[in-house]
């Protein structure tokens, strides 16, 4: 990591700084070992679960956490070969931006920054467990953000109780 944080400045009023990028949690489970290594098998594409968390810290600082869980099963017997999870986090300083822009940046731009670190951590962990590398596909955080916005803006459906 560089000695100084990376800073992006706009028109003199807006400031974006990457303060730190770090792994908050990393785990791997191989529930069917050692049997999994003694059989002929192929691996299915991973089942991915992706979530994001953000929190405001102090003085214009925010933490963003990208959580990725990949479950990979064998193609022949549907046994779980491995489950790997990473919580890749970063601290970002954002000053001079409207609140809606900060929310957008946390869920898109910050996640784009964190994703390569998360992808590398997952792949390295899987290879150290003697499995083939796990290569995650590109994730469109912009589309995910807009889908979440649409869901949150849809009117709540009535539960039929008349209230």
Image (cartoon, rainbow, N blue to C red):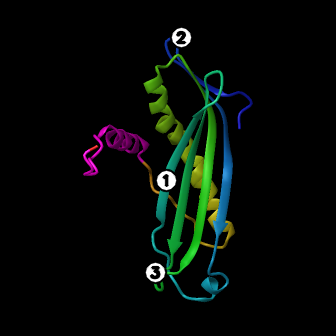
Image position of 148 with respect to 84: above or below:
above
Instruction: Tell which tag, 1 or 2, sits nearer the viewer.
Output: 1
Give the image quarter of residue 104. Answer: top left
Residue at horizontal 58%, vertical 89%? 39
Rounded to the nearest whole Å, what is the CA distance between mark 1 and mark 2? 35 Å
Q: Nearer the viewer, residue 66 or 1?
A: 66
* Marks 1, 3: nearer the viewer: 1
Q: Residue furthest front?
A: 162
On screen, residue 6 above or below 148: above
Of residue 119 and residue 99, the one placed in the foreground of this image is 99
Helix, strand or loop for disc 1: strand
Quadrant location, the C terminus: top left
Disc on res. 12: 2
Question: How far across and how far down the image is residue 150, in percent?
Answer: 32, 40
Circle 3 packing at 10 Å, graded few (<14), some (14-19), many (20+), is some
Q: Which mark is residue 75?
A: 3
Above/below status of 154 relative to 97: below
Q: Earlier in the sequence, mark 3 or mark 2?
A: 2
Q: Position of residue 18 (x, y in %)?
A: 62, 31
Boundaries of the magenta span: 140-162
Q: Residue furthest right?
A: 3
Mark sitting on residue 50? 1
- Judged from the image, the secondary structure of the residue bearing numbered disc 2 is loop
Circles 1 and 2 in contact, beta carbons < 8 Å: no
The quadrant in which residue 82 appears is bottom right
From the top left corner, tell me how far across and down residue 131 is, in percent: 61, 72
Give the quadrant of the N terminus: top right
Residues at discs 1 and 3 in contact (Cβ within 8 Å): no
Q: State how far apart marks 3 and 2 are (Cα).
A: 55 Å
Magenta includes 158? yes
Q: Residue at x 67, y 57 (%)?
A: 26
């Amino acid at each position: 990591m560089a000695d100084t944080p990376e800073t992006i400045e706009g028109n003199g009023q807006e400031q974006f700084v990457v303060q730190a990028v770090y792994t908050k949690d990393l785990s791997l489970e191989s529930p069917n070992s050692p049997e999994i290594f003694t059989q002929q098998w192929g691996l299915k594409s991973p089942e991915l679960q992706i979530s994001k968390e953000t929190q405001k810290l102090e003085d214009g600082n925010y933490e963003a956490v990208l959580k990725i869980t990949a479950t990979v099963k064998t193609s022949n017997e549907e046994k779980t070969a491995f489950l790997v999870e990473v919580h890749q986090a970063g601290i970002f300083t954002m000053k001079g931006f409207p609140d809606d822009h900060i929310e957008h940046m946390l869920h898109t731009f910050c996640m784009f920054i964190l994703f390569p670190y998360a992808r590398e951590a997952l792949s390295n962990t899987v290879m150290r467990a003697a499995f083939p590398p796990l290569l995650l596909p590109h994730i469109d955080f912009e589309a995910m953000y807009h889908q979440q916005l649409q869901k949150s803006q849809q009117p709540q459906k009535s539960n039929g109780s008349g209230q």
